[in-house]
Image: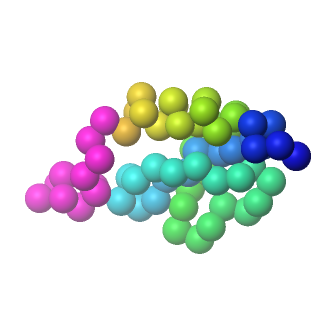
C-alpha cells in the first residue's frame, strides 16, 4: 500500500492533544478514536481546524 493510499484515523488523548493513527491498527491505550477517517492530509487538515489551542487541557484549566 502506498503512503498516499493509506487511511488514518484522528485520535485524541485525555489532555485533548490530537494525532493521527493508521486506521488498520488498534488505537493505542490512552487515545480515543474521534471517528474521523481519511487520507493523512485529510486527517491533518481536520486536526488543524479543531485543535486551535495546542496547550494541554490541564494547562488551559489552570
Which of the colour schemes (rainbow, by chain, secondary structure, one colour) is used?
rainbow
Q: Is residue 58 magenta?
A: yes
Q: Is residue 59 magenta?
A: yes
20 vs 30, nearest the viewer? 20
40 vs 28, nearest the viewer? 40
Q: Give left or right: position of 31 versus 15.
A: right
Which secondary structure dominates the residues rendered in magenta?
loop
Q: Position of residue 54 (x, y in %)?
A: 29, 47
Q: Is residue 31 above or below residue 49?
A: below
Residue 26 location, quadrant = bottom right
Q: Position of residue 22 (x, y in %)?
A: 71, 52
> Which residues are drawn in magenta?
52-62
Q: Residue at x 58, y 49 (%)?
A: 20
Q: Position of residue 16 (x, y in %)?
A: 38, 52
Q: Residue at x 28, y 57 (%)?
A: 56
Q: Residue at x 18, y 59 (%)?
A: 59
Amino acid at each position: 500500500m502506498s503512503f498516499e493510499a493509506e487511511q488514518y484515523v484522528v485520535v485524541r488523548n485525555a489532555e485533548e492533544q490530537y494525532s493521527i493513527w493508521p486506521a488498520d491498527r488498534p488505537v493505542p491505550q490512552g487515545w480515543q478514536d474521534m471517528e474521523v477517517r481519511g487520507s493523512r492530509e485529510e486527517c491533518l487538515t481536520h486536526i488543524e481546524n479543531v485543535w486551535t489551542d495546542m496547550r494541554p487541557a490541564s494547562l488551559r484549566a489552570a
